[in-house]
Amino acid sequence: MNSDLLWYRAPAAGFLEALPLGNGRLGAMVYGQPVTETIALNEDTLWAGGPGDRNDHTAAEQLAPLRQALLRDADHARAERLARAMQGPDTQPYQPLGTLRLSHRLPAPARDYRRSLDLRTATSTVRFGSGGAEQTRTSFVSAPAGVLVHRISAAPGGRVDFTARLSTPHPALHDGELTLGRAPAQVTDAGPEYRGDAGTGFGIGLRVLAEGGSVRTDADGGVTVTGAVGATVLVAAATGYRGWDSEPTGPDPALRARITAVLDAAADRSFAELHAEHTADHARLYARAGLRLGPPDGDREQPPTDERLAALRAGADDPGLAALHFNYGRYLLIACSRPGSQPANLQGIWNLDRRPPWNCDWTTNINTQMNYWPAESTGLAECHSPLFDLIADLAQAGQRTARAYYRCAGWTAHHNVDLWRGGNPVGGGPQWANWPMAGAWLCAHLWQHYRYGGDREFLAERGYPAMRGAALFLLDFLVEQPDGSLVTCPSTSPEHRFVAPDGTLAAVTAQTAMDYWLTDELFDSCARAARILGVDRELAVRLDAARARLRRPRLGADGALLEWWEPLTDEDPGHRHLSHLYGLYPGERITADRTPELFAAARLALDSRLRHGGGGTGWSLAWVTALAARLGDGELAHRALLRLLDGSTAPNLFDLHPPEIFQIDGNLGATAAIAELLLRNDPQALRLLPALPRAWDHGAAHGLRAHGGLTVDLRWQRHRLEQAALRATHARTVTVTVPTGGRPTRVTDPDGDPVPAQHRVTADGACTSSFAARPGAEYLLQPG
């Protein structure tokens, strides 16, 4: 069953039906229209605005009275007013680059139409007949060549006639093959503002290479091809962005030269050479991991993707659609996040609007982090690196924010970040704006990267310095209580509010459950990192001592984990954010073995959310799926995943935030959650198939990654593990728990020779085996 192909019988009618391509920096959405083809373009550094210090350096004057209002007076209304007084300007939005339009002259209306996206080759293909010949259009965005490549070819007896033209929503001029302009100086409620030489300069270059026929370039930059048997259209782009703290340049000669050089280099090579290089580069990442659900039946083609979605919504059983969604998430992360690019924003890299929803920025109270949940577990560690670059920038810019708002050492950021790395609390509701915990959550990704790969150099040079700065901020930010405990104050639970004792709605309090999980986790990982590196012994002791004094989350009268530090009535009992459950996932503080009471309390809290309609957006349902996986409840996870596919997925499989706003976090979060159903990194043992849904009775996964440099392949039939293959990157003892139905596990090498191992069969019918693994060796595990 082919789980690597999206295909359709009709062209895209809009953005949510178009097919995405990207090389991390340059993005394209291909509509596949036979007569007037549209390919929307983005470049990841084209943003409105520019560098500058957006911090309010008087904001810290509000901190002491705000803490007094909360900790002494219990005056939530005053705390809300003071929190708002600490807010500043909003982020600036990510911008569309432009559009490539190709107006085709066809001999007859298109027939036998088909368009597709092959995830294995990152190639979009459109085929149809017109007159007596078939026409094929092949598109990809090459990372090695740095260009969009769009080829039009006709079968023998046919011809290619079209006009290609670039346009942009920004003021611009055409200069030969180049279209040059500037992004807005800023975007406000009144719309984009363009001011003289302010704003980031950009350029788009168009080059058309025809095979036979004639080529004519118009004064407005359009290129007309007549009577060719084929043509290759190349598009390159660049901006004047020079870093988050430097003024960008305009469309100057250097920018023009960069674009021309890229086009020249690509034009010197054949389409076949460009495509072969591109597919090899993409496969280097994509082929590492993959998922198939359902019996193995070769590459039997499924119905069109939109028809499969419609059938699923009508009640059809289609496990392969979940596998396609998993593979598509990995494809999207490769396409929008490559070493040297910007990290994936709210829409990855694909955006049509000058004022997109939520500025298409990095929303760091869940969405940005969720984008990178699958990076390590599904074999895309390189794609994680743009997020590490963002963290490194924030670790510098956030020092000003920490001082300006809290008079603290170290660094911090709040819930919105743009290209210019402003980390200040933006204007609006304190429930989202006044949340200074982004640094702690982002640093969890640095620690996870180390845990998966064991790269000590990365930990020393990139991971630990940022973790240390974020921990220093929290050490200063914590407030001692009369009982000696330490709390974060002010504190919010992202985007949720409660009913205060006086009946008003409020968001600001002291130490929400999420703040505890984030602080506890960061202090623990930072102290461990310091000891691994042999540095900062005194700081590690301070972190351990502070961690022991953190006020722990409480349980309600019903036994459920509380979201705030006291029993309070939720504004929305089914709220989409599940922040108080961070300790269960993506954190690892709540487990059935080590914290059984909290594990049961987390289950009750999740059940309550869902009972009141929680998980109402795609990304929230992805989080529910992952939480259910950690709870070992494959059926709950499967129901959440079906809801995501049923109500929060566009025809092109883009994740939707209701009603129809594209957010890529649901795609990428769901990929991570599916991986969690198949492989779990428990501290005691690596668990295989810990929460396999009953509907997934047959399947196979390859390339899943586990902590400590392990890669795992799985194959199961009739809901029973048939075989697992483990590979280690360095010498270590592997402890793995396999569902065997009470049988012992056989551990062998690929030749079938037994490997010395210790086994223990548990009451739940699983077998835990331990054995010594050698670097580069493969080990096969099978139920005995």
Image: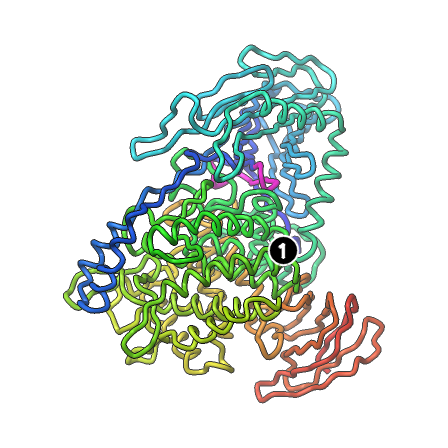
Identify residue for label 1: 381
Q: Is residue 217 above or below residue 203?
A: above
Residue pictured at 53% horizontal, 13% vertical: 220
Judge left or right: residue 145 versus residue 518.
right
Q: Is residue 92 above or below residue 745?
A: above
Q: Amino acid at mark 1?
A: Ala
Q: Is residue 752 above or below residue 23?
A: below
Q: Is residue 563 above or below residue 754?
A: above
Predominant SS of the magenta segment: loop
x and y percent of residue 571 in the render? 25, 62
**In the image, which residues are magenta?**
14-26
x and y percent of residue 381 in the render? 63, 55
x and y percent of residue 49 in the render? 41, 34
Point out the image quarter for the N terminus. bottom right
**Dot 1: element:** helix
Residue lying at the far front in this picture: please name it: 538
